[in-house]
Image: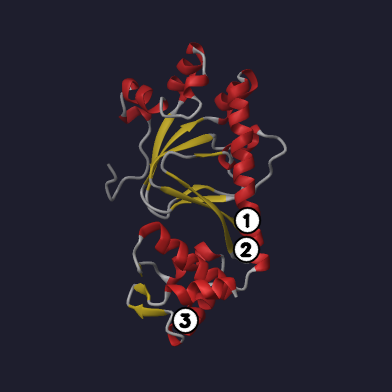
C-alpha cells in the first residue's frame, strides 16, 4: 500500500463502498443514527503518511478526529530551542483527540504529530465531528473519555520527567520494550531512543556507555543487547 513515492492518498483513489467499510471501524459508529452514519461516510477521508512525515504541527488548522487504520503516530510538544517531549503514541485501532482539540474549547495543546512508520489514517473533519458531538451524547462522551485518557498519559510522562532520574527512565524504557516484545535485542538509534525517553541524544549516548561499562547492556552497531534485565529492574527501583 505504501510506495516509496507515496505522499498522500485520499478518497478520490478509493471507492465509496471501501470508505463505507472503513468508517464502520470507528469506535462510535454503532452509536450513530443512520443519517449520521451517512454524513460520516460521505465526509471521511483516508490519508497515508510516510515514516517521519509530519501529520499535524503547531499553528495548523484543526485536523479533525483521526482513527489509525495502520501504523503509529508520535504526539509531542516542541520547545522554542527545539527540544521535544513525547506525550503519547497513537497506534492501530486507536483515535486521537488532540488532532480535534478545536472541538473541545477548553483543550489547548500546541502539539506536533508525526508518523513513526508508514501510517494510514481515517479522518473525520473537525466540523463534521463537532456536529456529531453536539447532537449525539454518546459521541460527546467518547470525546471526553478519550481526552481524559490522553491527559492521564501526559501527566504520567510529566511525573516520569520530574521524579525519576534519567538512568531509571532509560532502564524502565528498556524493560518495557523487553516485556512488550520478549526480545533482548533493541534495534533503535540513539536519536529514536532519546525521542521516546524525552532527553537529548548526547545524554542517551553517555548513559548507554555507562550501562555498557556496568554490564547492563552490550552496544552493537544499530542495536542494543540487554544483558542484565535484573540489574535494570534493580536500577529502576533504587
| Count of marks, rendered view | 3
Q: Residue at image x 54%, y 52%?
A: 88
Residue shown at the point (57%, 62%) measured from the top left? 84
Vertical arrangement, residue 152 with respect to residue 24, above or below = below
Which residue is more in the foreground, 8 or 212? 212
Query: In the image, is residue 7 above or below residue 161?
Result: above
Percent position (x, y) of residue 57? 55, 49
Horizontal arrangement in the rendering, residue 129 relative to residue 23 (left or right): right
x and y, in percent, of residue 108 in the image: 69, 44
Residue 148 as seen in the image, left or right of residue 214: right
Q: Which residue is mark 2?
A: 160
From the top left corner, tell me how far across and down residue 94 is, in percent: 47, 40
Q: Are marks 2 and 1 in contact (CB under 8 Å)?
A: yes
Label 3 crowd bin: few (<14), some (14–19), many (20+), radius 10 Å: many
Which residue sits furthest top? 35
Q: Residue at x 68, y 66 (%)?
A: 162
Spatial CA distance of label 1 from label 3 is 25 Å
**Measured along the vertical axis of the image, is residue 134 above or below residue 164?**
above
Residue 12: image location, x then y, percent: 34, 28
Q: Nearer the viewer, residue 30 or 57?
A: 30
For label 2, the SS is helix
- Which residue does the image show at 64% across and 41% down from the upper left? 148
Q: Of residues 134 and 148, which is closer to you in this image?
A: 148
First reached walking from the N terminus: tag 3 or tag 2 = 2
Few, some or many residues within 10 Å of mark 1 (<14, 14–19, 20+): some
As drawn, the label of residue 156 is 1
Residue placed most toward the observer, 57 or 215? 215
The answer to whether the residues at label 1 and label 3 have Cβ atoms under 8 Å apart is: no
Please tell me the numbered disc located at residue 211: 3
How far apart, in angstroms, are the residues tagged by discs 3 and 2?
A: 20 Å
Which quarter of the rendered picture does the C terminus lie within? Answer: bottom right
Colouring convention used in this rendered image of the protein: secondary structure
Amino acid at each position: 500500500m505504501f510506495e516509496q513515492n507515496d505522499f498522500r492518498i485520499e478518497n478520490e483513489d478509493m471507492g465509496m463502498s471501501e470508505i463505507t467499510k472503513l468508517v464502520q471501524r470507528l469506535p462510535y459508529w454503532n452509536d450513530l443514527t443512520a443519517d449520521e452514519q451517512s454524513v460520516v461516510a460521505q465526509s471521511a477521508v483516508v490519508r497515508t503518511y510516510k515514516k517521519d512525515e509530519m501529520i499535524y504541527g503547531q499553528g495548523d488548522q484543526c485536523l479533525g478526529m483521526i482513527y489509525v487504520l495502520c501504523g503509529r503516530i508520535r504526539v509531542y510538544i516542541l520547545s522554542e530551542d527545539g527540544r521535544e517531549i513525547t506525550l503519547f503514541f497513537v497506534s492501530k485501532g486507536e483515535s486521537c483527540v488532540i488532532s480535534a482539540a478545536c472541538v473541545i474549547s477548553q483543550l489547548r495543546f500546541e502539539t506536533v504529530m508525526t508518523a513513526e512508520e508508514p501510517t494510514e489514517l481515517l479522518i473525520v473533519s473537525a466540523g463534521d465531528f463537532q456536529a456529531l458531538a453536539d447532537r449525539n451524547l454518546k459521541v460527546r462522551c467518547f470525546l471526553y473519555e478519550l481526552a481524559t485518557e490522553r491527559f492521564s498519559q501526559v501527566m504520567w510522562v510529566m511525573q516520569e520527567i520530574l521524579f525519576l532520574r534519567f538512568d531509571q527512565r532509560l532502564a524502565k524504557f528498556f524493560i518495557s520494550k523487553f516485556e512488550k516484545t520478549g526480545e533482548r535485542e533493541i534495534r533503535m538509534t540513539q536519536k529514536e531512543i532519546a525521542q521516546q525517553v524525552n532527553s537529548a541524544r548526547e545524554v542517551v549516548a553517555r548513559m548507554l556507555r555507562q550501562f555498557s561499562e556496568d554490564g547492563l547492556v552490550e552496544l552493537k552497531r544499530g542495536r542494543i543487547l540487554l544483558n542484565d534485565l535484573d540489574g535494570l529492574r534493580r536500577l529502576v527501583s533504587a
